[in-house]
């Protein structure tokens, strides 16, 4: 049986699914997801963040705003170690520099959440129940 991965998405008023950090990103970096379709990052060298287990995904989702969790398939898996500090998201240059590994100080990055996997592409396959009794 293939490994299951989990993507957390924010659901907007118009029912579109976007990255949970969509409010912190510049418009040209916002990622939209559609069920059953492959999604890639807006910046070619970057990655999309998913979780390798449902429990970590649920804990992360419970700490945020209204969102859904989807089982997903991924391509181009990498283990994640750091992420850009949220205060640096508003500038597309900061995001590009982070993924290129240049011009980023240690104060601008944070460890990723436990269970985080990085992917080159993500396909949402099935919505997950958000109760903690699974």
Image (spheres, helix red, strand yellow):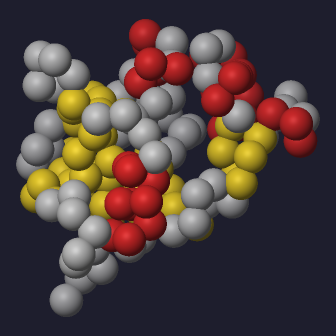
Say which of 103 and 68 sits in front.
68
Left or right of 18 in this view: 113:
right
Q: In the rendered image, is residue 125 in sight?
A: no
Say which of 124 and 54 sits in front.
54
**Whole-percent x, y for residue 29 in the image:** 46, 20
**Exactly how many numbered labels are in the figure?**
0
Q: Residue at x 88, y 36 (%)?
A: 107
Left or right of 108 in this view: 94:
left
**Whole-percent x, y for residue 16 in the image:** 16, 25
**Whole-percent x, y for residue 104 in the image:** 84, 33
Q: Residue at x 32, y 53 (%)?
A: 7
- Name of the residue lying farthest toward the bottom: 1
Please tell me in which quadrant of the rendered image residue 126 appears. bottom left
Q: Residue at x 58, y 58 (%)?
A: 113
Indicate whether 16 appears above or below 116.
Answer: above
Indicate whether 57 appears above or below 42.
Answer: below
Q: Residue at x 11, y 44 (%)?
A: 35
Please tell me in which quadrant of the rendered image residue 13 appears. top left
Please tell me in which quadrant of the rendered image residue 45 appears. top right
Q: Quadrant of the C terminus?
A: bottom left
Say which of 32 and 40 sits in front.
32
Q: In the rendered image, is residue 132 in sight?
A: yes
Indicate whether 1 appears above or below 47.
Answer: below
Left or right of 130 in this view: 89:
right
**Whole-percent x, y for residue 62 in the image:** 38, 50
Q: Quadrant of the N terminus?
A: bottom left
Indicate whether 95 appears above or below 49.
Answer: above
Left or right of 62 in this view: 89:
right
């Amino acid at each position: 049986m293939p490994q299951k991965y989990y993507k957390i998405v924010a659901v907007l008023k118009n029912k579109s699914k976007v990255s949970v950090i969509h409010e912190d990103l510049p418009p040209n970096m916002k990622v939209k997801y559609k069920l059953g379709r492959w999604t890639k990052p807006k910046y070619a060298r970057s990655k999309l963040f998913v979780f390798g287990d449902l429990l970590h995904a649920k804990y992360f989702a419970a700490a945020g705003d209204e969102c859904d969790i989807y089982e997903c398939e991924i391509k181009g898996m990498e283990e994640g170690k750091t992420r850009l500090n949220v205060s640096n998201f508003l500038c597309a240059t900061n995001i590009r520099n982070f993924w290129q590994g240049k011009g980023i100080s240690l104060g601008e990055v944070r460890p990723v959440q436990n269970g985080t996997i990085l992917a080159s592409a993500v396909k949402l396959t099935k919505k997950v129940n958000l109760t903690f009794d699974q």
